[in-house]
Image: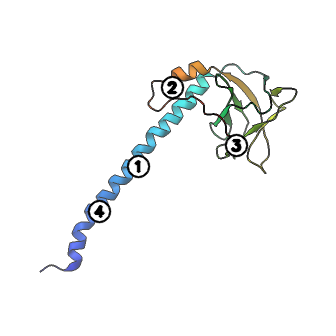
Amino acid sequence: MTRPGVEAMKLFPAGVCALAALLLAGCSLAMPRAEREHAYLAAVHAAAGKPVDSFTFVSGSLYSWRPLDENEVLVYTRPRKAWLLNVGLCPELPYTPTIGLTSHVGRVSVMTDSVLVARGHFPCRIQKIQPVDVDQLKQAMAPRKGGTITPAKASS
């Protein structure tokens, strides 16, 4: 005759192994995404040209955007026209649902204009602007599974 607790103990190691396997599977799923994000960030920086002082921007013509981290955002003013903006430290940038850009006389300029994040936060002053070669970026990401970078239209 076996004691009831002994049967439960025999099952415990199998349950622990199953839980460990699930946790490891979850980690392995997260790693490819992190690798994709790292590859995307590297591809954006590789496709970014020399810094410029400003670019043409008509208010309300932000086609799409993607935060890269707390310091940088990739903005598309048209489907094939992108700009890498460095805004210094802007902690809300990766989490904001919408952004805006200030402009003066139809131009977004370094040290004059800002990226506006969700309401109630300070504007993030643009410290550097680099044009991005969208074709080069697409080519760099094409071989990677899930690496398509066609920008989605920005929500209003």
- Residue 10: name its quadrant: bottom left
Dot 2 or dot 3, earlier in sequence = 3
> Residue at the spot x=49%, y=39% of the render?
34
Q: Secondary structure at mark 1?
A: helix
Give me the disc on residue 26: 1
Give me the disc on residue 148: none
Q: Which residue is mark 3?
A: 98
Relative depth, front residue between 105 and 15: 105
Q: Position of residue 107 (x, y in %)?
A: 82, 26
Dot 4 or dot 1, earlier in sequence = 4
Q: Amino acid at mark 4?
A: Gly
Q: In front of the other: label 2 or label 3?
A: 3
Q: Which residue is mark 4?
A: 15
Q: Which residue is mark 2?
A: 141
Q: Secondary structure at mark 2?
A: helix
Relative depth, front residue between 102 and 110: 102
Query: Gap in Å between the C-alphas at discs 2 and 1?
Result: 24 Å
> Residue at the spot x=44%, y=31% of the render?
145
Query: Gap in Å between the C-alphas at discs 2 and 4?
Result: 41 Å
Q: In front of the other: label 4 or label 3?
A: 3
Dot 2 or dot 4, earlier in sequence = 4
Q: Amino acid at mark 3?
A: Thr
